Amino acid sequence: KDYLINFLTRPFLLDTNELLSFLKAVEVIFNWKNKKTPNVIFNLAEVKEIDMLGLLLNYKIIEFCVENRCICDSKLKTNEYIQNKLSEFKFWDLLNSYLEEKRADYTNLDFFMKGKRLFIAPFPLLRENEYTKAKIKESYFPKIEEYYKEMAKNNEENIASMILQCFSEILLNFWEHAVNDTKSIIIANGNVDFIEIACADTGNGIISTLGPTLNENISKGEILLKSLEMGVTSKKDTDHMGCGLWIINQITNLSKGRLILISEGQYVKNEYGKISKGECSYWGGTIIYVFLSLSSPKNLSDILPENEYNELNNLNVNFQ
């Protein structure tokens, strides 16, 4: 008998606004480790609209199933629209390679500029030299700067700097909390008006890693909310400053953007300066989604006094 996982929330829709409903649909999968559940069909056939975050999380849950021997003899059911979207965002080959060969090849994924669009294909944040902050700065920053120099005409340096800052802080956050590398995947998409960045893993979530360093009476929701505060880190007495999510949250505030943070049954949202939090279905690991308007780009210098800005901006971070 087929076991049907319907990656579907409201009829035909799977996007950022329906994220909590999606989590409810896939929550059961985190209980399937080593069960080798047969004949699972990941059903996307009736989805008529999907965004970048929806594509990323579909990929991550299937990757989790394969990596943790949750399934066997399973299939992905799609339609032409979904196939085109998966191909456009470079997930199609990755998904099929996981279902068929139980591994993914990331070597062909890179930075793209297509017409008026900027796109950074999904790639894993692993603790190897090729994925360090310096590598991202050397590989992507000049290309981002070039894109906005051509397209934006004004503020291109500030825009590129803001994007790099967010990339770097997301990378550092996942490395801080992912004690065991779990192929955290980051992806970005945008144009002259906006940038959206999403990252997800299925390993050690923020609540599990940060909680033990805080007051033992604090709730899971409060742990996640405190992760947005300056100086809060799970690695005390190290060079981790605990500023990453705080910086992203402050940039989100100033640019009137959106930040969504999900970990282990809790969520925090900053939507255009309004903070909300609550319980949600379980996701083993962490999800971060950032949407920023580029009409008035903001950076560290906009949110820190000059002396603190210079200290933090020049910090030499140990990535080990």
Image (cartoon, grey):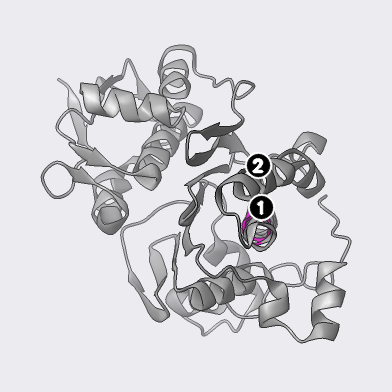
Q: Secondary structure at mark 1?
A: helix
Chain part drawn in magenta: 162-167
Q: Residue at x 58, y 67 (%)?
A: 297
Would you say the residues marked 1 and 2 are in contact, meaning their CB atoms lie under 8 Å apart? yes
**Residue 307 located left or right of residue 9:** right
Q: Residue at x 67, y 55 (%)?
A: 164
- The quarter of the picture where residue 57 lies is top left
Q: Position of residue 246 (x, y in %)?
A: 61, 74
Q: Position of residue 42 (x, y in %)?
A: 26, 29
**Residue 38 located left or right of residue 258:** left
**Most foreground residue, 216 or 241:** 241
- Residue under circle 1? 171
Q: For the residues marked 1 and 2, what is the alpha-carbon distance in whole angstroms?
A: 7 Å
**Most foreground residue, 186 or 258:** 258
Figure quadrant of the N terminus: top left
Q: Secondary structure at mark 2?
A: loop
Q: Residue at x 60, y 55 (%)?
A: 153
- The quarter of the picture where residue 103 lies is top right
Q: Is residue 36 something that shows in the picture?
A: no
Which residue type carries mark 2?
A: Leu
Find residue 125 and name its label: 2
Q: Main secondary structure of the magenta part?
A: helix
Q: Residue at x 43, y 32 (%)?
A: 89
